[in-house]
Amino acid sequence: MGDDVAMPAFQALIRTRGLARASLLLVATLAIAQAGARGKDHPPPEDPLAKEPASPITDHFAFRVDYFHGSATTTGHVDDPNAATAGTPFSAENDLGLSPRDHEFRSELFFRLRSRSRLRVDLWELNREAIASPSFPIVYGGNTFQVTDKVRTRLDWRQVDLTYSYALLRASRYELAAGLGIHLLQTDAEARVPERQIHEEFSGSGPFPTADLEGTVRLWQRWSFEARAQYLSLTVSSVKGSLADYSGNLQYRLAPNFALGLGYRSQQMKIQVSNNNPNGLLELKVNGPSLFLRASF
């Protein structure tokens, strides 16, 4: 399917179903297909590590909930292709009053499809609103926000990450996997000055792949350490995006099916839209620690 068909189809799915619902529908379809492929007459082979102590290396399914306590930095510009003046680069936190704090709950699903094949699904979003006066005139699309304006700004960022990886190395105490991630990004930015009837919107969405590398080490009977790295930059139709995601966590197995952990994550996402009105660029950097609970079997 070409970019001219794939991109509108994805955007239509987002509009009708929503990003999270569309992604969960995809995950459910994959799970059903996997179950159907096995069938009653073809049960999955026994995991050679089934008798090892419970750890992320032996888990076949896991559900994780994180409380993320980090910070966010958002920069960008919004251009009107019909205007003589390009959009002014701005910081959404410093110039438009958005909160630099990113305190949210995130969720993750993990499936081990075979002893070495894995699928991970991460869902998160960051929605912020503010009312502030810029410290200097900002050209935003076809309008200019003056220092005397009370600008109402809204910025929503939603992301669903689906990552397939294959364990190149797997033993009782370590696992090293490489694979491919597909990240469904959707961003919506809105700025308005009701007193002057000024309203500007900017939005972009698209699926972007990344190369994935992740490793796990069981340090002791109940302690494990995980690290992940994903990155790629790609242009799909009129949307250019890049994503870098680095994380690590230390977890303690409270019981065979439950673990408590502490992690740190650094993410940088960028969406640039061209051949549209308005055009523009939004770049979001998020980093900070998290506390999580993980249920598995």
Image (spheres, rainbow, N blue to C red):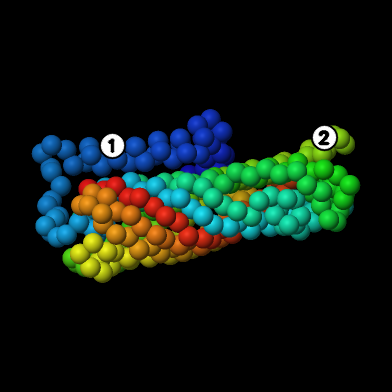
**Residue 100 visible to the viewer:** yes
**Residue 159 visible to the viewer:** no
At label 1, the amino acid type is Ile
Mark drawn on residue 226: none
Between the C-alphas of marks 1 and 2, the distance is 49 Å
Residue at x 33%, y 46% (from the top left corner): 63
Q: Does residue 45 appear to the left or right of 166 in the view shown?
A: left
- Taking the view exactly as shown, the residue that stands out farthest to the top is 16
Total marks shown come to: 2
Q: Position of residue 169 (x, y in %)?
A: 24, 68
Mark drawn on residue 194: 2
Residue at x 81%, y 52% (from the top left corner): 134
Q: Does residue 238 appear to the left or right of 46 in the view shown?
A: right
Q: Does residue 121 appear to the left or right of 33 in the view shown?
A: right
Q: Position of residue 142 (x, y in %)?
A: 83, 45
Tag 2 secondary structure: helix
Label 2 Cα neighbours within 10 Å, binned few <14 / some 14-19 / many ≥20 = few
Mark drawn on residue 32: 1
* Residue 25 in which image quadrant: top left
At label 2, the amino acid type is Pro
In this view, 208 is above or below 227: above
Residue at x 84%, y 47% (from the top left corner): 145
Q: Compare residues 140 and 70 and report the one nearer the observer.
A: 70
Q: Position of residue 290 (x, y in %)?
A: 45, 56
Residue at x 48%, y 53% (from the top left corner): 68
Mark toward the start of the polypeptide (1 vs 2): 1
